[in-house]
């Protein structure tokens, strides 16, 4: 983007402020948010009063900054964001690094702040490393929405959670137990070692396995850094190191597809269970050849779509990120902001040979 974006953003911010003041005095009764952000992360607190009837301004500039570009999952998610932005008459753009690293995300955020975008929607490679840059963006007037992988709550306005952490992890544990039973050895193939969502999900899965299935032993957690080749090699290493391994759970789309590719061409196909989170288009061939029986995911297009509408609702003043705020996200309907500014998309879907043809993403 060019410096010309600064002018419409200033106009938009002024218009929103004026509209918010007018509508606040006229309607009242909204929710407010003030001190909790500063207490939780030291960032600029969202202040003001929500007006659910405020209109989304025309021409909002909305930029998606995924963990990395050229990742099919984020390609679909950002596509959902673009769909939403078109619906409410905004200007969509997508920027991001080619590798999933926090340091590279910081430079993009700084550039977006200088350009004066209205909404930044990002999936964090690290919960804290991009906080300073995001807070500078918020101080400059941008609304910050995290999706897929959160930052410290003090660094953003709202977080779009694809599903509750408990829902995601219990779904993966159920898929695992359905295939290997209540005993055996399992390993996790994760993304990066600092990925907030991956670490939380793995911790919760380990807790659930220990509590409900004590005879299932977690023998290793390895990191493919959301790189296909590294994930492929880590899968190979797991199978060479742990000769009695019964299953691999990969809660990352890149890892699951890479592991499936290795298994499908190895002696372990059909012998070692593989499940986790993946996209139907990436995993279709491995369902068809029997390498994988089931995996799960939410619809990433809906995730990006909801993130864009949440950003627009923040910019319009429909919500301020406080618990209980409500807004309408186009075709997805009404959503309510929960504690810590979290908005949950819904439950994940389990894909098998019986239903995968119904999905195309």
Image (cartoon, rainbow, N blue to C red):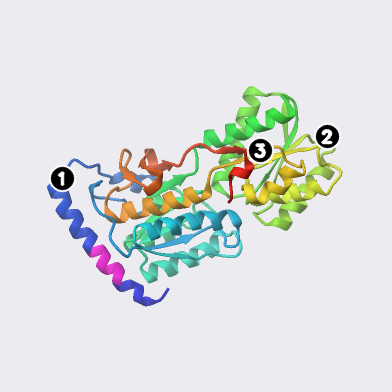
Residue 62 vertical position relative to residue 348 in the rendered view, above or below: below
Residue 183 vertical position relative to residue 52 in the rendered view, above or below: above
Residue 360's disc number: none
Say which residue appears at 49% left-offset and 67% top-offset: 107
Residue 274 vertical position relative to residue 361 in the rendered view, above or below: above
Q: Which residue is mark 1?
A: 27
Q: Is residue 87 magenta?
A: no
| Foreground residue among 300 and 141 | 300
Say which residue appears at 65% left-offset and 36% top-offset: 354
Nearest to viewer (mark 2 / mark 3): 3
| SS assignment for the magenta stretch, majority | helix
| Foreground residue among 77 and 185 | 77
> SS of the residue at dot 1?
helix
Is residue 303 toward the left or the right of residue 87 in the image? Answer: right
Is residue 62 toward the left or the right of residue 274 in the image? Answer: left
Residue 38 vertical position relative to residue 93 in the rendered view, above or below: above
Disc with the residue nearer the chain's start (2 vs 3): 2
Seen from this angle, which residue lies furthest bottom? Answer: 3
> SS of the residue at dot 2?
loop
Say which residue appears at 54% left-offset and 55% top-offset: 76
Highlighted range, magenta: 8-14
Q: Which residue is mark 3?
A: 352
Disc with the residue nearer the chain's start (1 vs 3): 1
Residue 244's disc number: 2
Mark 1 and mark 2 in contact? Answer it, CB < 8 Å: no
Is residue 135 toward the left or the right of residue 356 in the image? Answer: left
């Amino acid at each position: 983007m060019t410096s010309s974006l600064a002018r419409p953003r200033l106009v938009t911010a002024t218009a929103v402020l004026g509209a918010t003041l007018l509508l606040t005095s006229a309607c009242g009764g909204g929710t407010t948010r003030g001190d909790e952000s500063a207490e939780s992360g030291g960032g600029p607190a969202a202040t003001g009063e929500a007006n659910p009837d405020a209109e989304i301004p025309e021409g909002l500039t909305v930029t998606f900054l995924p963990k990395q570009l050229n990742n099919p999952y984020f390609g679909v998610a950002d596509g959902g964001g673009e769909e939403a932005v078109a619906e409410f008459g905004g200007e969509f753009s997508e920027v991001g690094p080619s590798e999933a690293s926090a340091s590279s995300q910081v430079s993009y955020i700084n550039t977006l702040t200088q350009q004066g975008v209205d909404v930044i929607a990002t999936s964090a490679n690290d919960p804290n490393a991009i906080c300073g840059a995001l807070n500078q963006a918020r101080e400059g007037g941008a609304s910050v929405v995290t999706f897929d992988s959160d930052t410290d709550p003090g660094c953003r306005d709202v977080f779009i959670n694809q599903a509750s952490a408990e829902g995601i992890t219990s779904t993966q544990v159920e898929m695992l137990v359905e295939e290997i039973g209540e005993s055996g050895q399992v390993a996790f193939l994760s993304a990066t070692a600092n990925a907030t969502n991956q670490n939380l999900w793995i911790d919760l899965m380990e807790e659930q396995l220990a509590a409900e299935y004590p005879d299932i032993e977690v023998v290793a957690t390895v990191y493919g850094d959301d790189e296909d080749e590294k994930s492929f090699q880590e899968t190979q290493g797991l199978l060479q190191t742990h000769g009695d391994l019964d299953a691999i759970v990969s809660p990352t789309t890149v890892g699951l597809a890479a592991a499936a590719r290795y298994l499908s061409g190895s002696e372990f196909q059909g012998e070692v269970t593989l499940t986790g989170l993946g996209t139907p288009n990436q995993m279709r061939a491995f369902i068809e050849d029997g390498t994988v029986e089931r995996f799960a995911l939410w619809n990433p297009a809906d995730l990006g779509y909801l993130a864009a509408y949440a950003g627009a609702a923040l910019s319009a003043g429909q919500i301020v990120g406080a618990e209980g705020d409500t807004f309408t996200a186009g075709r997805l309907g009404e959503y309510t902001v929960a504690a810590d500014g979290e908005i949950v998309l819904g439950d994940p879907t389990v894909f098998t040979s019986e239903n995968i043809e119904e999905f195309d993403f």
